Image: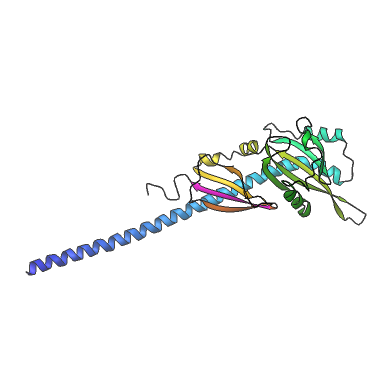
């Protein structure tokens, strides 16, 4: 009987040791998984912010090209149609990102290059047009460039508008007043190709970049991967001039690998 009792005690102790060991291993694995998930999310957050910074940097390069016309106007010089066309012709890029350059005095498009194919934009009042007035007025009031779109352009196709506000001195006291806009019409798909955003997929990520329509509040997709987005994405808010972009990102293999 004592032998049976001892065997039961040994069995109970063995089972207890197994349970305790199992719990310890489970807890350790839980923390290993949490650490891996945290590291993956930190890397994803850095990737998202770096991508937005790259987008902003490229946009600033295009703005630098348009600043010559902006500085001529701000210095009080007249901009003839020939001068505008000559300068704008040098802004065309090999990647065909800049589809057109517009000059809009008082917010109304009065000059555009190239003219052929873009005639429909002449006379468009950016400060009153329903699809453009929110961003145009933001740029006017803040003095910072603002991106409108992507949306369907009046001259056809899908693109985005980059509003760069122009101010001139109204009097000798240096007070500045709004003159109008230098506007770049961007082919957004070509722009996304230029910054090689598809490399995010090569790096193992699924993503979607979007913003809210300032007028309706509806979601506007700026760029996205080809795959359907899962539900466990991480959202990174990225502040850009006069707007906030939302970057949803997730590794294709998940935050914790299937093997682990």
Residue 153 at x, y = what percent? Answer: 71, 38
Tell me how the rendering is colored.
Answer: rainbow
Image height of 32 relative to 226, above or below? below
Q: Quadrant of the N terminus?
A: bottom left
**Is 125 placed left or right of 238 in the picture?**
right
Residue 225 at x, y = what percent? Answer: 54, 41
Residue 141 at x, y = what percent? Answer: 78, 54
Seen from the viewer's position, the closer of residues 84 and 149 is: 149
Residue 245 magenta-drawn?
yes
Residue 28 at x, y = what percent? Answer: 36, 59
Residue 164 magenta-drawn?
no
- Residue drawn at 51 percent across, 44 percent down: 206
Judged from this view, the residue extending furthest toward the right is: 172
- Residue drawn at 41 percent across, 55 percent down: 33
Image height of 82 relative to 207, above or below? above
- Residue drawn at 32 percent across, 58 percent down: 25
- For the image, the number of numbered tags is 0
Judged from this view, the residue extending furthest toward the left is: 1
Image height of 145 relative to 95, above or below? below
Determine which quarter of the picture holds residue 120.
top right
Q: Magenta region: which residues?
A: 243-258
**Is 97 placed left or right of 237 in the picture?**
right
């Amino acid at each position: 009987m004592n032998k049976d009792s001892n065997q039961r005690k040994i069995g109970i102790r063995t089972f207890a040791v197994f349970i305790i060991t199992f719990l310890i291993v489970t807890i350790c694995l839980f923390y290993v998984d949490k650490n891996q998930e945290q590291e993956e999310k930190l890397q994803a957050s850095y990737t998202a912010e770096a991508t937005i910074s790259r987008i902003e940097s490229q946009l600033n390069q295009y703005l630098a090209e348009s600043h010559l016309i902006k500085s001529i106007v701000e210095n009080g010089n007249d901009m003839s149609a020939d001068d505008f066309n000559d300068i704008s012709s040098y802004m065309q890029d090999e990647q065909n990102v800049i589809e057109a350059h517009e000059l809009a005095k008082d917010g109304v498009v009065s000059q555009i290059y190239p003219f052929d194919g873009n005639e429909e934009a002449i006379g468009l009042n950016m400060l009153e047009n329903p699809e453009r007035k929110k961003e145009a007025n933001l740029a006017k009031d803040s003095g910072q460039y603002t991106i409108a779109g992507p949306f369907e352009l009046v001259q056809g196709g899908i693109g985005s508008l980059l509003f760069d506000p122009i101010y001139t001195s109204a009097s000798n006291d240096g007070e500045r007043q709004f003159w109008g806009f230098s506007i770049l019409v961007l082919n957004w798909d070509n722009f996304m190709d230029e910054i090689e955003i598809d490399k995010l997929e090569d790096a193992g990520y699924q993503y979607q970049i979007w913003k809210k329509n300032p007028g309706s509040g509806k979601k506007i997709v700026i760029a996205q991967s080809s795959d359907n987005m899962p539900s466990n994405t991480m959202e990174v808010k990225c502040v850009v001039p006069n707007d906030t972009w939302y970057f949803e990102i997730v590794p294709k293999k998940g935050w914790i690998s299937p093997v682990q």
